[in-house]
Image (spheres, rainbow, N blue to C red):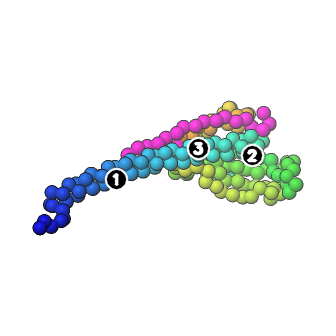
Amino acid sequence: MRQSGFTIVELVIVILLTLVVGIVVSTLFIGQNRVYQTETAELNITNDARTGLDDIDNYVRQAYRALQSYSSYTAGSQVLILQIQSVGASTQLIPGTYDYVVYYLTGNNLYRQVYPDAASTRSATTKKIASNVNSLAFTYSDPDFALVTTVSTAMTLQQDVGCQTRSITLSSSSKLRNY
């Protein structure tokens, strides 16, 4: 009478096959996870760069003029100061009153700060516009801020993902509203 069961050789073969399948599945999962993280990082920095440039362009197009200084800020390659006509309650421009918008880089974050006139309906806000900013450069069409007609912006964002670095550089140029 023969007893039914598994031999030691059969058990070893099943364990080895299970181990090989587990390694293959784990390798595929890790590889796909790495691709997902890389693509997500690229989408995030692209979105931040586009959002940042769109925001800057929007305010430059509304600006009455670019300023050399306002409050504790001095305009330069990483600081942009804009004077924008104030808006009243009925969304009408208020003659002779201005709000001020300042873009500045702190660490790797780009911020927009709005300083409204007392008569303006704009809110005083500080908003982070973009993260992971590796470099930022504002250039002006004229060294004399009273004559600036165009503001150009170049921005590079960079994010490390594991052993890879994802980077994007975007630029734009916008005319002030009076030009």
Q: Which residue is mark 1?
A: 26
Task: Write down the residue under mark 3.
Answer: 49
Q: Is 118 colored magenta in this rendering? A: no
- Amino acid of disc 1: Ser
Instruction: Give the mark, 2 or 3, whose residue is nearer the N terminus.
Output: 3
In the displayed structure, does residue 2 sit left or right of residue 40? left
Q: What amino acid is at disc 2?
A: Gln
Stretch of the chain drawn in magenta: 157-179
Q: Which residue is mark 2?
A: 83
Element at label 1:
helix
Q: CA distance from mark 1 to mark 2?
A: 57 Å
Where in the figure is residue 19, as x and y percent of width and height?
26, 55
Discs 1/2, front: 1
Question: Of helix, strand and loop, which mostly describes the magenta segment?
Answer: strand
Residue at 60% across / 36% down in the picture?
171
Q: Amino acid at mark 3?
A: Ala
